[in-house]
Image: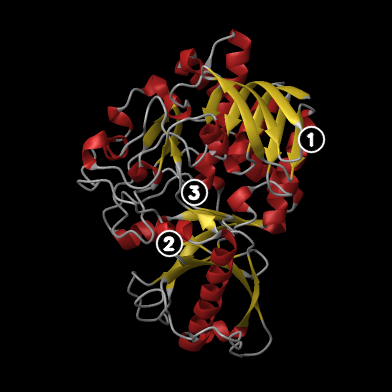
Amino acid sequence: MVSCQLAVIGAGSAGCGAALAASRLGIDTILVENYQRIGGTSTFAGVNCYEPVAGATGISRRIFQEMQRNDSAGVGFYRITRHCMIPDEAAHPFPGSEQRIDPAGRYEDTLRSHMEEQEFSRALRLRRGIIFEPELFCRTVEGLLAQSGCCRLRTGVAPAAVECRDGVLRRMVLTDGTRLEAARWIDCSGAVAAQCGCRMLFGQEASGRYGESGAPKFPEPVLNGVSQIFRIRPAADDAVEPLPAGIPAGCWWAAQFPMACITEYPNGDFNCNMLPTMSGLEFYAFEAGAVSAELKRRVYAFWHYLQTTFPEFRRFRLHHIFPRPGCRDGYRVLCRRMLTERDILGGLARQKRDEIIALCDHPLDFHGRGGGGRSGLLYGIPYHSLVPAGMKNLLAAGRMAGFSALAASSCRLSRTMLQLGEAAGTAAYLSLERREDFPELPPGVVRELLQDGGVEL
């Protein structure tokens, strides 16, 4: 039996934030991750472009500063230099958005989405984000966890079975046979909540469920799109790389090839994010092995399209395809307080400030579902959106937390997930110190301790 005060399951952005926050406060923490390295979509899926978003202070800022200190050439700021929706007669046509390194960028420039600007082209020009080498993120966060002296990292294992009764999760068996016991738990994967019998949500809710004007009249099995991100590297000569055998040159999965967000790394490589590569529902309909092969086929076809249609890409070679798809949507947990479209459209002014433990201003953003880009108001995520209904010692932090499908399309960014993880880890510390279950813990005390740690709320 392995025991700890807090077990964090899933070492994506939320899990890393939770483990860093808890271990910094002196909690004996175990961080469990199914993959061999931490980082989740930010590392294995190539989602290592941090979009501009409000609230990315606290641990988010600290990780960035540590990455800069560890390897300043491995992290940089970017800005939009070309966009297919910004007319520019002097520029060559571009298949989406080009984002290049901005040597004059500052971290503060990335703390606002600017999407509330009335002039769309001006809003895009103002946006600043961060791109980093995935390996640098792994080394940095693992180093910070080691420095705390309070976190044990277990990789290559996942939850296999749980012992949960009357809303209390007591023990867990991992896939390697290890029995894990903890007083408090944070689920950053969704697997734990599901195994504990929590109600799981999937797809778009009906408008009447949460009073959302943008939702359909009846529930619909639709999900945000999935991206298979790849990386290209400059080459010495111009050439169109041959398509692998059996892959058509045309787009067989849609009426035309999608757009892409193409972002420069500090070393001159580019991160290529097809928007999207596959619809969310189609992704879940595939078998696990088959979906990976199909996503890669689409990447090869798309790369061939870029090289044959836009000559500038002939000066690059496909360097690698990231091993994991970037999923924007999936199963979510029914929590005591559900964040909804009304919270996002109403903004922080219409919310109870003493309940808010994280901020966001990303718009409602649907890849592959039609529409999107609405709003951009600053809003808050309530503490009880992390507390699964019926559970006493379990929090859900990450994209599977207490969000409606519409709300999830807005608050899904990696640095927002880091915020949620930091809030969950902080709440775990307070729950243990005050000997209170998560549902009874006052959100105000979580806010206060977060602000003491550098989180701006």
Q: Residue 286 has which mark? A: none
| Residue 18 percent location from the top left of the image | 61, 32
Quadrant of res 228: bottom right
Name the residue that disc number 1 marks.
146
Query: Which of labels 1 and 2 is toward the front?
Result: 2
Identify the element where label 2 is drawn: helix
Q: Residue 109 has which mark? A: 3
Q: Residue at x 47, y 60 (%)?
A: 283
Amino acid marked by disc 1? Ala
Identify the element where label 1 is drawn: helix
Quadrant of res 73: bottom right
| Residue 106 percent location from the top left of the image | 55, 49
Choose between 85 and 251: the one closer to the eye. Answer: 251
Binning the other alpha carbons within 10 Å of mark 1 as few (below 14), some (14 to 19) or many (20 upward) gives some
For marks 3 and 2, give the CA distance. 36 Å
Choose between 22 and 311: the one closer to the eye. Answer: 22
Q: Earlier in the sequence, mark 3 or mark 1?
A: 3
Name the residue that disc number 2 marks.
282
